[in-house]
Each structure stands twice: as structure tokens, then as C-alpha cells.
Image (tube, coloured by chain):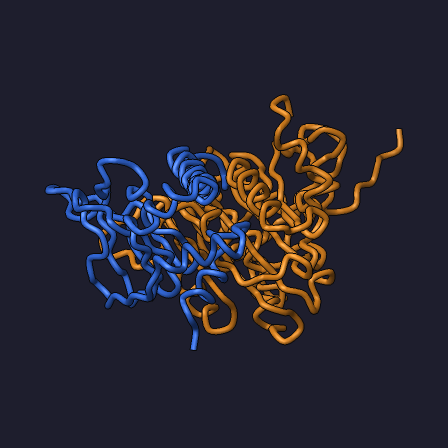
Amino acid sequence: MLTIADAVNDCTLFDGLSAAHLGLVAGCGRFVRFPAGAAILREGAPADLFFVVREGSVGLEVASPERGPIVIQTLGPGDTLGWSWLFPPYRWHLDAVAREAVAAIAFDAACLRAKCDADHELGYRLMGLFADVMLRRLMATRLQLLDVYAHGSR
Amino acid sequence: MAAVEQPPGLLTPRPARVLGWRRETAESVTVAIEPAGEPWAPGQFNMLYAFGAGEVPISISGDPARADRVVHTVRSVGMVSAALGRLRRGDWVGVRGPFGTGWPLAAALGRDVLIVAGGVGLAPLRPVVYELVRRRADFGRVTLLYGARTPGDVLFGRELERWRGRIDVLVTVDAASPGWTGDVGVVTSLLRRAAFDPARAVAMVCGPEVMMRFTLDELRRLGQPEPATWISMERNMHCAVGLCGHCQLGPALVCREGAVFRSDAVAWMLRVREV
């Protein structure tokens, strides 16, 4: 049977962490499942955890009174869901909805923040890993904004 | 003075009749014409001459196994491409070609194949996909990642569905509309989900230049070697035979040395603003 420690070891998000740090991270994780259509995160709600998606698809949405929910990005296996847990006031900025049945690892934010406070090396490494995730998302968003398919023959 | 003979089809268009057409999206049309030239390879292009309008390079987008027709997918972005998009069954078009280099199907035998297409860039790659699907057992894992602007801009939707049974197909759009069940986001964000082994994969990339630049960056990060990655470049082509120099890209002429290049030959030029 797959243990949380095994699953955390397999997460590319945590590539480069030492075995000891992986153990600390795994200690804050648990397996979770969401049926299709389930609300995983709600804008404004406390950001008390984050996820690494293992199976399925998650839509990041902005609720709009005029247009209904607008999906701005989808996440799939291996993707990280949620970084508001890192920064006060620890509230979600977007909705996240399971577009199909989702299996994920959920990490308890308070547990992990406490371990980062106690072990600054872990905190530094984790912050670097999340900064990389945020940088990729920022670059992807910039590319999305460029609307590259709008012009030209391609 | 003695007349200079030109091989037919090199600089003189040959007439070909339009066999059929299909609207793909609001801006794109696929036109099938009767074969008028030499056999072609996936990745090559023809110069299509719309009488009274002009001539433009258009990639061949059809099935290489269909010897009875040559298929092109045209996005209407100017006067000539708009005229080509208005062609209907029985109309005539001028054809020169096929020109240019092809996708490295032989080099991909026995290896994983990763295809990354953006927008109308799927059209020059469709002949490759036909071959990969037909000769599925000759290749390792095959993944097609395709990005389009909106769900309405997705090319070859029915075929994408058909191919899913034979190869991995992931489609994403930059902006979703209600009812869209595929992915949302840029095509590069799908790369980490693609099942391929960089040590034994061949990657083929075609789309707008900015999209290809970002794709190459991400492939490099994932460990895909540049010599095992091919891209299709686009420049302003006129003669298509390496005489006029309009399509010069640094030391290369896209019409003659391309349009398909091994990425280590041209990737550095994607960052040179002057070319």
C-alpha cells in the first residue's frame, strides 16, 4: 500500500529536499479524494492547507455574477494547488473545483508552518520550491495574456 | 537568346483543381486539391497561388497515405489567404512545390514522440500524427499537446477525439467558454503531464514563435536534448527555392533549410531580435 511518505517522495514539487525534510513534510500530509463537481477551495475561506494533485483535474475559477464561474486555469496530476497558506492573511484568492474525480495529498498548513518556524532550513527550501511554482504560473499567465494565437498565420 | 527552361512547378505554378473544402474554425478552412507535383513528406509546404490575388506558402496538412489529394489548412490573415479560403470545389489554384524539409519520422522510430502544437501550428503536424497513429507499434509513447486560443479555435476536433484511443492527447485553451471540459492554460503547462522519457524522446514543435520559445525553454528544463527537438519556422517566403533571400533566418533560408529545423540549429536565433 502506498504510504504518504512514498507519495511525498514521488512529488516533483519536493525534488531536492533531504530525506529528513521529506519526512517532516510527509508528517503533515494525508490522502484525500473529491468527487467530480466538489468545491475544493472557496475564495475568501481560510487557507489552512494545500494540495498536490495525484489524479484528476482541478479548475481554478473566479466567480462572476454576470458570466458565472470563469475557469482561468486547470491543474492536473503532479500540479500544486494553493499557496495562500504561505502568506497572511491565509485566505484563498480563487475557487478550486474538481472537474472530475480528484485524488490528492492534502498538507496541513499550520503543521507545516510550525515545522518551518522550528527548522529555518526547511522553511528556506520550501519557500524556494514554492517560488519556483509561482514563477512558472506567472510565466504561464504572461504567455496567456500575450494571446499568441490571435495574430499571424499560426 | 536561348530560353531558360525551368522544371515545372519550381518557379512556375501548375494548375490544380479544388476537390473539396471544409470550414474548421471561423478563420480557418481546409482545402483539398488534386495532386499536381511530386510526392510530399510530412512537414513540407506548397506555394499556393490564388489567381488574381497572389501566392503564399501553406503547409500540407493532409494524410500522407492519400495519394489522390493534397490537403492544406489555411488561416485567413491577409488578402491571399482569404482568397484561398474562398476556394470551392471545382475552382482552380496554382501550385508550386512541395518544398522544404520534413519532420524526422525516421529518427523517431522506436522512440517516444512528443508533439507540441499551438493554433494553426497543428496543421503542419497533422500528417505526422496520421503516420504515428497508422504505424503506432513502431514508436514508443506518443503524446500530442495542443493549445488553442478558445474552444472555437480548436482545429480538427473530431480527429483529436479519434486519436485519443491510440495516442495521448491533451488539449488546452487560453480562454475557456461555458461547457468546455478540456484544460485551460497555456500549452507549456501541459508538458509536465506528458508521459515521455527525455533520454529517448523526439519532440516536434510548431506554433507561433513566442509559444515555441517558451516550449523550448520548458523542454530544456525537463531534460529534453535540443538535438532531439525539431521546430517548424515561418518567415516571409517568396521564391521558396532559395533564390530571393526573403525568408533568411540568420545563416539559413527557411524555404530551403527549413521549414523544419533541428532546434539546436535555430533556437538561439529565437532570442535575436533583429532576425
Relative placement, left or right, of B161 versus B224 is left
Q: A3 above or below B180?
A: below
Comparing B211 with A119, the one in front is A119
Q: Residue at x 59, y 45 (%)?
A: B221
- Can you give x and y, in whole percent of width and height, for residue B128 in the image? 60, 60
Q: B135 above or below B114?
A: below
Task: Find the residue positioned furthest to the left.
Answer: A65
Q: Residue at x 62, y 29 (%)?
A: B271
Q: Within the image, what quadrant is residue B198 found in?
A: bottom right
- Can you give x and y, in whole percent of width and height, for residue A89 in the image? 22, 36
Task: Find the residue positioned furthest to the top.
Answer: B274
Q: A118 above or below B89?
A: above
- Can you give x and y, in whole percent of width and height, for residue B12 in the image? 70, 41
Please identify the quadrant where the C terminus of chain B is shown: top right
The colour with which the image depicts chain A is: blue
- Can you give x and y, in whole percent of width and height, for residue B80 in the image? 50, 36
Q: Residue at x 74, y 39 (%)?
A: B241
